[in-house]
Amino acid sequence: MSAQELDLAKLEPWLREKVPPFEGALSADKFAGGQSNPTFKLTAGAQHYVLRRKPPGELLASAHAVDREFRVLDALAQTDVPVPKVVALCEDDRLIGSMFYVMEHLEGRIFWDPTVPEVGDADRAAIYDEMNRVLAALRRVDVDAVGNFSTEENSGNDGGRKPDQDTVESLVTDLGEKFHLYNGNTPDKFTLVHIDYRLDNMMFGGPYPITVVDWSPSIGTGGADAAYFMAWQFPRQGGIVGLEGVKRSPLMIPSDEAYIEAYCQRTGRASIDHWPFYMAFCFFRIAAILQGIKKRALIGTASSAEADSRAVMVGPLAALGAGYIKQSA
């Protein structure tokens, strides 16, 4: 059974026991996008749910921890961060070949292009402001209050594989040196982070978010999540849709400075220290993720058919990170 399929014959009895009421013939459709954990829409009669699973096959021990996702989503249900309601978790790999969980299905719009051509200027401005608000709400979550999460609980979804390019190797060295200058400490406090916070991982009703999706949560620093979202400089090539070369002001898309200022105001801070370090780490991490995705494509565990094609961006993204590390004090 591949990452694109589900064994419905084995899944259906479990769903009828664990996800009541569950009536009618079961069908499943895989959602487009996503390279980490395959995600499916389940339909039974008039009812709809979402199932998110680990990819089948050989994986790193720390990667694709859908049980962690389940616990974090359950904890966030009591906060200002919009998340789907989780329903049930199956930790038995034997049922369908890998661990999975089921959550509610929500209807809304997903925007795949950060220029958001589907809406007018006012709604586009509101969408970006709402993304900023939700990101700030996530940073304000009291980790100790909502659940028992360790700082060692981090995501392994980058595949743990460092791409073999000179630019990346140099960036790894530079990041390590900067980290050493911080005496081995990250330049921001630990909090709960999404890791993959971007426009197409949010679902909207009008300009307002219904939910944040595609979680691979961990304990990290708020600056890292902010930097990942702020990677507007992504080129519009190699399967990546960024804002490189786009004039933002006419589209009511905020500048880097305006977005950071709004985020800092909402999180009660004057600034984000060592911002270039976070941006450099962001681009390195994405390059490593793409290399990991390429590896998963080679061994047959990638969730998306176009996984291999994006590896061409490893070098260019590492170069962008190298540019930021030069600015890092």
Image (cartoon, rainbow, N blue to C red):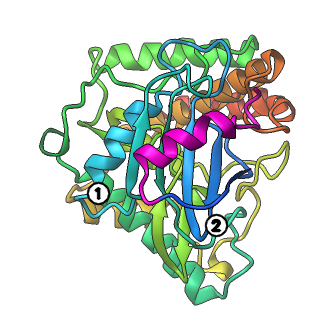
Q: Residue at x 55, y 11 (%)?
A: 173
Q: Quadrant of the N terminus?
A: top right
Please provide percent x and percent y for residue 283: 60, 34
- Horizontal side of 314 relative to 238 (left or right) equals left
Which quarter of the figure has residue 132? bottom left
Q: CA distance from mark 2 to mark 1?
A: 21 Å
Q: Label 1 belongs to which residue?
A: 77
The three-letter amino acid code for the residue at tag 2 is: Ile
Please provide percent x and percent y for residue 242: 71, 55
Q: Residue at x 65, y 71 (%)?
A: 248
- Horizontal side of 56 relative to 82 (left or right) equals right
Looking at the picture, tell me which residue is in the foreground, 37 or 150.
37
Q: Label 2 belongs to which residue?
A: 110
Residue 36: tell me if it is visible: no
The three-letter amino acid code for the residue at tag 1 is: Ala
Give the label, 2 or 1, closer to the camera: 1
Vertical relation: 138 (above or below) 273: below
Q: Residue at x 79, y 15 (%)?
A: 299
Vertical relation: 219 (above or below) 61: below
What crowding class fits label 1: few (fewer than 14 Cα within 10 Å), some (14-19), or many (20 or more)? some
Residue 83: tell me if it is visible: yes
> Dot 2: what SS?
loop
Vertical relation: 127 (above or below) 99: below
Please provide percent x and percent y for residue 176: 46, 14
Please provide percent x and percent y for residue 5: 75, 37
